[in-house]
Amino acid sequence: MSLREFVTRREAHEHLKSRGLNCAIATLAKLACVGGGPPITYFGASRRPKPLYRLSDLDAWAECRLHRAISTSGRPMHSCPIAVKHAGSEAGAGEQAAS
């Protein structure tokens, strides 16, 4: 695993935006707390550890949010297979796993 794989929340926003997928920094922060966002890793043991995202996780998460058709029930016709949290990564204070 290379440290170059990780980006800050602002860089994650810019990465998604450069691909035409606008996801606000505040939205990424909220999803880190309530679940449903891209997998996240925290760096640092301070009271406010720095949230970091892997570029490959951002791309996989964004791809799962794209869909072509909506069923007549209004639900997407596929589900996203990526994990909310990588095995072995430590969750931050406000992070909850999506169920």
Image (tube, rainbow, N blue to C red):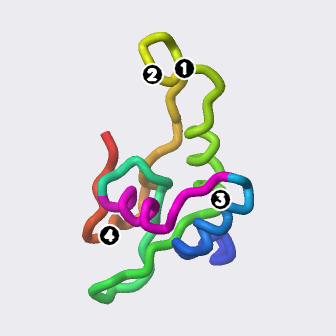
**Residue at the spot x=52%, y=35% of the render?**
81
Circle 4 Cα neighbour tier, 10 Å, few/some/many (<14 / 14–19 / ≥20): some
Secondary structure category for the residue under label 4 = loop
Residue sitting at the far bottom: 46
> In the displayed structure, does residue 31 sit left or right of residue 57?
left
Span highlighted in magenta in the image: 21-33
Residue contact between numbered discs 1 and 3, judged by CB atoms under 8 Å: no
Nearer the N terminus, badge 3 or badge 2? 3
Residue behind mark 3 = 16
The label number, if any, that marks residue 75 in the structure image: 2
Residue behind mark 4 = 92
Nearer the N terminus, badge 4 or badge 1? 1
Residue behind mark 1 = 70
Task: Measure how far apart labels 3 and 4 are at the Cα level.
Answer: 23 Å
Task: Measure how far apart labels 3 and 2 are at the Cα level.
Answer: 24 Å
The three-letter amino acid code for the residue at tag 1 is Ile
**Residue 44, placed above or below residue 12:** below
**Residue at the spot x=32%, y=50% of the render?**
97
Task: Measure how far apart labels 4 and 1 are at the Cα level.
Answer: 34 Å
Specify the quadrant of the image occupied by residue 13: bottom right
